[in-house]
Amino acid sequence: MKRNLFLYSLIFSLLFVSCGVQRQSIPDLFVDLKKAIPTLAIDLRYHGDHNFVGRPIRGYEGNRIYLSKAAAIALASAQRELAAENLGFKVFDAYRPQQAVDHFKEWASAIADTVAKQEFYPDVDKRDLFNLGYIAEKSGHSRGSTIDLTLIDLRDGKELDMGSGFDYFGERSHHDYQGITAVQKANRKKLRHIMEKHGFKSIAEEWWHYTLINEPNKEVYYDFPIR
Ligand SMILES: C[C@@H](N)C(=O)N[C@H](C)C(=O)O
Ligand SMILES: [Zn+2]
C-alpha cells in the first residue's frame, strides 16, 4: 500500500513538473527582444501598474519582451535605419499571452474599477473599449508578431511627441485625427513610414500598434507567461 502511494505521488510530481516545463517553455518561433536588439528602449507597461488597468497584468511575470524572429529581424533593420537620424524605438508591448487578454476582458466588465480612467480613457466608457477597436478579444499580440512602440531621440532618450500617450483610448490616438500639431503629425508619420517600409501594417485607432504583414503562425494564439 505504502509502495503504491509512493508510486502515485512520484507519477503525480513528474506529471506536474513536465506540465510546468511545458508552460514555461518559449516556442522556437520567439526571441527575447532585449537580447536580439540590445539598443532597444523598453517600458513594458503591462508588467507594472502604469497602464489602463492600473495594475500588473496576468501573464506579465517578468520584465522581458518576446517577439517572433521574423518580426524581430524586420524591427532590427528599421532600428538600424532610424539610428542614422539619431532616432530609435521604445517598445511598450510585444507578445501578449492570451491570459493577459482575458484579464483585460474581466477588467472591462468590472464597471466600478476605473482607477486609471483619467489618463487612459477619459471620454470612453470602459465597456466600449473592445467594440471601438482599442482592445482586441483575440489580439495579434498573442500571435507574436505585433508590437506597440514609439520613437525616441537617441541623444537624450526622450520620446517624440505623438500628440497622445501610449494606450490613450480616444479619437486623439487615431491616425487620421486632425486636432494635433504639425510636429505631432510629422512624428506619427515618421513612425508609420519606417514601420511600413520594413513590412509592418498599422490599425486606424492606435498610432503605436503595428503587425508584421508576413507574420508566421497566423492562426496560433499563444498563452505562455512572460518570465
Ligand atoms: C491595448 C492596446 N495596446 C492594443 O494593443 N490594442 C489592440 C487593438 C489589441 O489589443 O490587439
Ligand atoms: Zn497593440
Image (cartoon, rainbow, N blue to C red):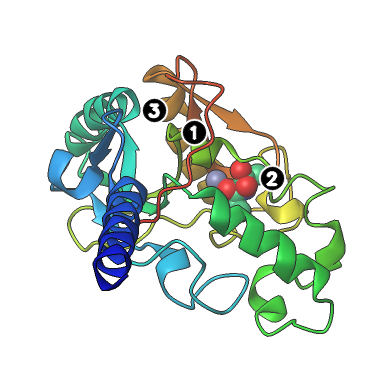
Label 3 to label 1: alpha-carbon separation: 22 Å
The three-letter code of the residue at mark 2 reads Ala
Whether ligand 2 has any atom under 8 Å from the Cβ at mark 3 is answered as no
Judged left or right of residue 172, residue 6 is left
Judged left or right of residue 226, residue 111 is right
Whether ligand 1 has any atom under 8 Å from the Cβ at mark 2 is answered as yes
Tag 2 residue: 136
Judged left or right of residue 158, residue 202 is right
Q: Position of residue 217 (x, y in %)?
A: 46, 20
Q: Residue at x 48, y 78 (%)?
A: 49
Mark 1: few/some/many CA within 10 Å (<14, 14-19, 20+): many
Q: Earlier in the sequence, mark 2 or mark 1?
A: 2
Tag 3 residue: 194
Q: Using the rendered image of the protein, determine whether residue 123 is visible from the camera's viewpoint.
A: no
Q: Nearer the viewer, residue 140 or 192?
A: 140
Q: Residue at x 82, y 48 (%)?
A: 132
Q: Position of residue 111 (x, y in %)?
A: 84, 77
Q: Using the rendered image of the protein, determine whether residue 47 is visible from the camera's viewpoint.
A: yes
Q: Secondary structure at mark 1?
A: helix
Q: Earlier in the sequence, mark 3 or mark 2?
A: 2
The three-letter code of the residue at mark 1 reads Arg
Which of the 4 quarters of the picture holds residue 225?
bottom left
Tag 1 residue: 143
Mark 2: few/some/many CA within 10 Å (<14, 14-19, 20+): some
